Image (tube, coloured by chain):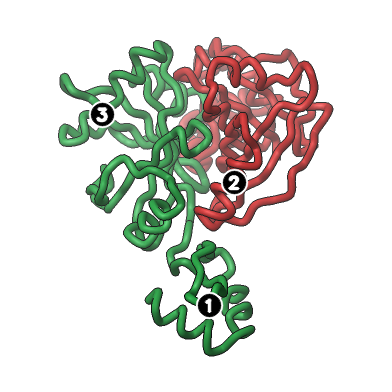
Chain colours: A red, B green
Amino acid sequence: MFTRLCKSVAQKGSQALLVTRALRQVHTGTALCQDGAKIPAGLWKLGSLNHVAIATPDLEKSTALYRDVLGAEVSDVLPLPEHGVYTVFVKLDNTKLELLHPLGDNSPIQNFLDKNKNGGMHHICIEVNDIKAAMNDLKAQKIRCLSPEPRIGAHGKPVVFLHPKDCAGVLVELEET
Amino acid sequence: MFTRLCKSVAQKGSQALLVTRALRQVHTGTALCQDGAKIPAGLWKLGSLNHVAIATPDLEKSTALYRDVLGAEVSDVLPLPEHGVYTVFVKLDNTKLELLHPLGDNSPIQNFLDKNKNGGMHHICIEVNDIKAAMNDLKAQKIRCLSPEPRIGAHGKPVVFLHPKDCAGVLVELEET
């Protein structure tokens, strides 16, 4: 795809600009062809906010807040032993919150809760349509991914986490949809 | 409204259940009529996630991340001196991120950035259709609001913040839409 686009840009000159404009909201990085022309770095696209993950030391209390006080629809408690968390989904009109509580001895959120006794926002998850293309672009632009390859996330889809220090202090998860 | 609903439940008995079911996603608290029957505590409704607010020590770098690396549509920098912040909106398909940076000497996010040098998630904002009804219910259920009355928020709409210690460590803003 990269080569094909590169040739297309080289051959068609200014048409590339029209292509780029037509790809509104499609990622347009700054990779260069051999002749230096800017081309779309990939055809991956950032999509919706899939969820905001909230780590909580008291899952029942936090679930009750959203269900009984704020009146949201919530899921049953879902144990995800392979991810070291219990999860409760809180449905909002356009996205969801995911309440997380440690499961097992090596939960990835235990350290966060040790530092944040009351709980807090753990990460945000944004959808992309091509996670490998996204990772290639991110690496090229010095945004660190926390794993060299995508992993299968809690929703059974490929995910990768980006380093918080490269993302305004926020742990950002990308999920392929 | 409360009295009218109460009478309705008392008079119509099991019809209240049908009403409650019809009000799917409408807040249904646990207030009681004089005869002990449960009734909907109010007709306010939790809606969409309006935004996730991210405080950043470097607004240009954070904007560049979302605009140039992740390919999102971002706004110009919007100074909001009455709220003590500069804001950049990052458009996602279903909601937005709001990048915040201190403006002036008494910015409400300066303390957060002093504790979180790299930045981080500051609050989430969820829409409600009746903020005063929501506040009444929240107070009755011992969820602390950070102001006794709604204030006009950054979008020109009534908002209230809820105490993080009552919300799983998360600063939650409710905005009337």
Q: What is the crowding at mark 2: few (fewer than 14 residues within 10 Å), some, or many (at least 20)?
A: some
> The disc numbered 1 marks a residue on which chain?
B
Evaluate whether label 3 is on the same chain as label 1.
Answer: yes
Q: Position of residue A54 (x, y in %)?
A: 58, 33
Residue A96 is tagged as: 2
Q: Is residue B78 visible?
A: yes
Marks 3/1: CA–CA distance = 53 Å
> The disc numbered 2 marks a residue on which chain?
A
Badge 3 or badge 1: first in the primary sequence: 1
Q: Position of residue B52 (x, y in %)?
A: 45, 37
Q: Where is residue A53 in the image (x, y as percent from the top left)?
A: 59, 34
At horizontal 52% and vertical 66% (from top left) the residue drawn is: B26
Quick one: B144 or B43, which is closer to the camera? B144
The answer to whether residue B49 is above or below residue A124 is below
Q: Quadrant of residue A136?
A: top right
Quick one: B27 or B177, which is closer to the camera? B27
Residue farthest along the front direction in this orientation:
B35
Residue B86 is tagged as: 3
The answer to whether residue B147 is above or below residue B61 is below
Marks 2/3: CA–CA distance = 27 Å
Q: Quadrant of residue B43?
A: bottom left
Residue corresponding to mark 1:
B35
Q: What is the crowding at mark 3: few (fewer than 14 residues within 10 Å), some, or many (at least 20)?
A: many
